[in-house]
Amino acid sequence: MTFPLAFRERVSYGLRLFKAKGHTNRAGLSGLFYISLWGFMADLTREEVEDILNQLKEYKERMEAEAELEEDQEEKEEEAPEEEEVPEEEETPEEEETPEEEETGDEETSPDEVEAKEEENEEEADETPHLQNRDLAGLDLSNLNFYGIDLSGSTLAGTKLADSEMTECLLNDVDLSKAELMDCILNDAQLNRANLSEANLERADLRRAKLHEANLSKANLNESILNKADFLKANLSRASMNNADLSRANFKNADMSGSDLSDSKLSIGVFYETNLRGANMVRAEIKGAKMFGADFNKARLTRVDFTGADLTEAQLTEADITRAKFNGAILRRTNLEGSDLSECNLDIADLNGAILLKVKLEGAQMNRTKLNNANLKGAYLRGVNLSRAKLGKANLEGVDLSDANLEGANFNEANLDGSDLSRAHMPEAVLEKTSMNKVALTGANLRKAKLDKSNLEGADLAGAKLKGASLVGTKLKGADLHRAEIDQANLSQADLSDANLTGATLEGARLEGAELANVKGYTP
């Protein structure tokens, strides 16, 4: 007995699923379901699909040929009056009368005739070959040309479509779960609400494809091309997009949690409020991307290139962001609490109002970075380069800035209470009206720094270099300044009561109006 090809294809797919999942697994038992039920319910075989594709191709070619003929006729009619020939002028009235007669005939058509024509049109439409709402699950349709075909509502679960041409195909609401689409061309395809969960789209070309609300969870998109693709509200959780090209793609409100985007290209993409929690984006390129409100909680962002990206109000908490590039990036009000940004490049980045509680920024480059009103309480910034950075009104309480380069940095009205700035390089730094209560500045270089009206009570400035610094009205009560270089510094109106100046040099220093009660090691 010979079974139909469709049945044999379904049996083959069912056996593959059964062998892959096993008889004790529900997914494996579903393979038997394919054999027992779907084999008898198969809509079409591969040969029948190919036949329909050929018919649709011929129909399209015929329609295009007819359209070309109509265009040629219209062009001839437009050119006719220019020839100014008498016969052609006489023919024009006759041509005008024809549609009038037809119109009168249409008006006289009875309702019964109209219904009959409509029924004929419906019958013709029903007879027209199509691939909509078809059950093609498990078939081998690889290497076929589906260009521009409407497959809306069809079932293609587990179907083999590798190397197929599906440009401009309509695949809205199609079930493509576990389908094999390797090297498939889906340029400009419509895949809105399509189910592509666990589908294999490796090396597929989906440029400009629309996948609104599509389900691509656990899908394989490694090395695929997705330039300008639209994934609005799509589900890409745990999808693999390693080394994929997603530049200029739209992921607004998409779920990409747990996905693998390592070595991928996402430049100039849109990630507005996108869920990227726990995603692996190691070495990804995200230059100039719009990532307002995106969630990167616990994501792996090592060596990611965020140059020029907009991460305003994004969530990057507890993330591994070591050695990443944020040159010129916008991170206003971004939450980076508990993240590791060691050796990152944040030159000229905008972090105004950012939350950097307990972050690690050891060895980071932050030249001319904006950190006004930022909260860096408890952050670890040892050896960081913050030259010419702006930290006005920033909270740096308890921060470790030892060995940091703070040349020309602006800390106006910032809070540095209890911070460690030992051996920090701070020439020409601006720290006016700054709170530095009990701060450690041992061996720090503060030459020509401005510390007017700042609070340095109980600060440790042993061995600090303050030559030419301005400390007008500064509170230095109980500060340790032994062996400090205070030559040519301006300490007028400063409070130095109970301070230790043992071994300090004050040649040329100004002390007009300074409070020197109980000062150790200095005789006025």
Image (cartoon, grey):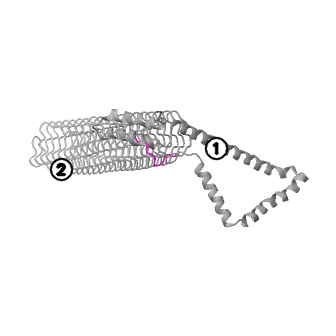
Residue type (three-letter) at the residue carrying disc 2? Lys
Compared to residue 386, the image places residue 83 above or below, namely below
Question: On the rendered image, what quadrant is the C terminus found in?
Answer: top left
Q: Give the foreground label among 2 and 1.
A: 1
In the current view of this chain or complex, which residue is farthest to the right?
A: 86
Question: Which disc number belongs to residue 59?
Answer: 1
Q: Secondary structure at mark 2?
A: loop
Label 2 Cα neighbours within 10 Å, binned few <14 / some 14-19 / many ≥20: many
Q: Nearer the viewer, residue 224 or 460?
A: 224
Q: Give left or right: position of 329 versus 419.
A: right
Please tell me how many numbered marks the rendered image carries.
2
Tell me residue 376's x, y (percent): 25, 46
Label 1 Cα neighbours within 10 Å, binned few <14 / some 14-19 / many ≥20: some
Q: Give left or right: position of 424 versus 215.
A: left
Q: Secondary structure at mark 1?
A: helix
Q: Which residue is mark 2?
A: 475
Tell me residue 248's x, y (percent): 47, 42
